[in-house]
Amino acid sequence: MTDEKRIERLSAMLKRRGIILPAFEIYGGVSGLIDYGPVGASIRRRVIQNWIEHWTINGDIVEIDSPTITPENVLIASGHVGEFNDLMTQCEQCSSAFRADQLVEGYHPNPDILVSKEIDEILTAEKIKCPNCNQSQWTSSKPMNLMFGTKIGAMKSSRQAYMRPETAQGMFMLYPSLYRHFRQKLPFGAIQTGKGYRNEISPRQGMIRLREFNMAELEYFIDPENPPIIDLSANKEKITLIPDPNGNEHKEIRITLQDAIDNNVIKDKTVGYFLSRTWDFLIGVGIEPSKIRFRQHEGSEMAHYAEDCWDCEILGEHGWIECVGIANRTCHDLLSHEKHSNSNSLRAWREFDEVKVENKEILAAKTSVLGPMFRDRAGSVLSALENLENIPDNLPFNLELDDGSNVEITSEMVEKKMINNSIAGEWFTPHVIEPAFGIDRIIWHILDHAYEEIEKEGEKYNLLKLKESVAPADVIVLPLFEKDGMGVTARKLNSQINQMKGVKCLIDSSKSIGRRYARADEIGVPWAITVDHQTLEDGTVTIRRRDDQKQIRMEINQLLTLIDSNMVSTLF
């Protein structure tokens, strides 16, 4: 069995069972767009809910929700208008467009770091053929911005905007509100989940590269001079890291995260902390530990805003795929938005351990002279004098006001004084650590890792061994037959279970009980309850475990108590 055939069978099952399907299929579909069907939408919702609960449990991180349409000036400040590009090339024979770095993947260990000229040289030297027409003549690769443009408003009054390429900018816009919410105390963070949009040049690999996708991002604001105290010594598990080789050969190492921090493999302790929390989340939703690694970006690969960045890559049928990026964005974003918006609200206050005393020379205004001289402009002149940083050696001099105009200040208007200032602290721009999760990619790998093909007693069937926390339902009720009151009892039991907080129950009464067990196994429901003739006689049911098909018989009320208290697994 080849990996390709396994992907085909997995994809067919996901489509057949309403998990993942092509979008707009009756119109031929659209590359880079997918639908989550009835089962898939439940899995997606549960994965996202797991993610939200994972990050908000300690109280230092809150959830926000901001618009998906973003004004252009915000994305100019963030760098996306100028920097958010992929290199594109076209086949001169058939005019098909491709991401240039994808075409040279087999000819360079890390095509992401290549510039246009380097990619063009590889395309020519290796005579790389077009996947569509098999020719090997290419245009020069050039950058293409990946954002979807749109307009806010109508006609001439409209303003340029884009569908957001990430959720991060919405959280930076809300920083002043977050700072107030946390009572002006760092560190704190905000999370946001939702749609992101990137006009990918050549989407491929199903859920791996989409044009509309589910994101989950966290922005954690810290004081770089007083970072959070991090202790990961309790976690003894060794994790695979690939540090930046700095010109040497890439090399995997197995090491605990605390040792990686102590040995300066991970230089930023806060980044190390988020690597640890990311590992915990992925294991919790069903990713195989041996198929996770963290790879540090090379210097030439680093995003324009990042000081350090690690990709969490997961191994699946498509090879090692980046699913999470954990970056130290420093103060780039907040400083840039302050500059472009002319705002000073994106800062935090840092108190000194001891009050500092500063001797400072100032120009003290003689208000009895300034008032009559400047009349209605006197207030602006006084403000400009108070904010004057460099005291001129000689008078008179020209003083620039906030409106850009200048006035002459003479010795009759001011006098030089020395004052003592007591300084208790200072304003600074926080740094930001950002873990950004590609939810669709993670869901694909959850499904990939959970998918098993089993042969038993000459029959083949599929099994999704999903973690209970991300399964589309907690339990399914199966009446043996829709007669003699079994269907009525099953529907009553289904209703009772669904009234429990946080528990989801399905019911299936179509075709044979064997076919229904198989359907439940294929969508990953961990527990199946069978209502049969004996149920009508003594109030007992059969409960079956998905992973090994073991069954036991028990009384309905006892089972309901176990389901309500999340203790069903104690039965076996």
Image (spheres, rainbow, N blue to C red):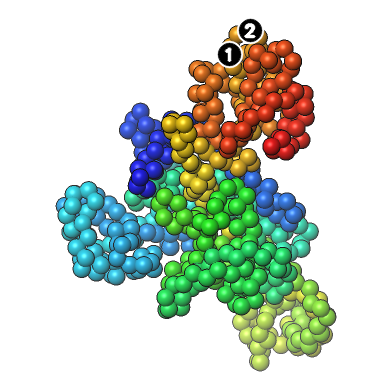
Q: Quadrant of residue 436?
A: bottom right
Seen at 17% across and 54% down, the residue is 135
Q: Residue furthest front?
A: 457
Q: Nearer the viewer, residue 42 or 461?
A: 461
At mark 1, the secondary structure is loop
Classify 10 Å Cα crowding around label 2: few (below 14), some (14-19), many (20 and above).
few
- Taking the image as shown, residue 497 lies to the left or right of residue 119, namely right
Percent position of residue 358, x then y: 78, 85
Q: Nearer the viewer, residue 560 or 473?
A: 560
Seen at 52% across and 70% down, the residue is 253
Name the quadrant of the C terminus: top right
Percent position of residue 406, x then y: 60, 76
Q: CA distance from mark 1 to mark 2?
A: 8 Å
Residue receiving disc 2: 484
Classify 10 Å Cα crowding around label 1: few (below 14), some (14-19), many (20 and above).
some
Q: Determine whether 382 is above or below 84 in the image.
A: below
Residue type highlighted by circle 1: Phe
- Taking the image as shown, residue 563 lies to the left or right of residue 400, namely right
Q: Nearer the viewer, residue 6 or 195?
A: 6
- Taking the image as shown, residue 333 lies to the left or right of residue 138, namely right
Residue 499 is tagged as: none
Seen at 24% across and 64% down, the residue is 123
Q: Nearer the viewer, residue 150 or 264?
A: 264
Seen at 37% across and 40% down, the residue is 8
Q: How many marks?
A: 2
Residue receiving disc 1: 481
Contact (CB < 8 A) between labels 1 and 2?
yes
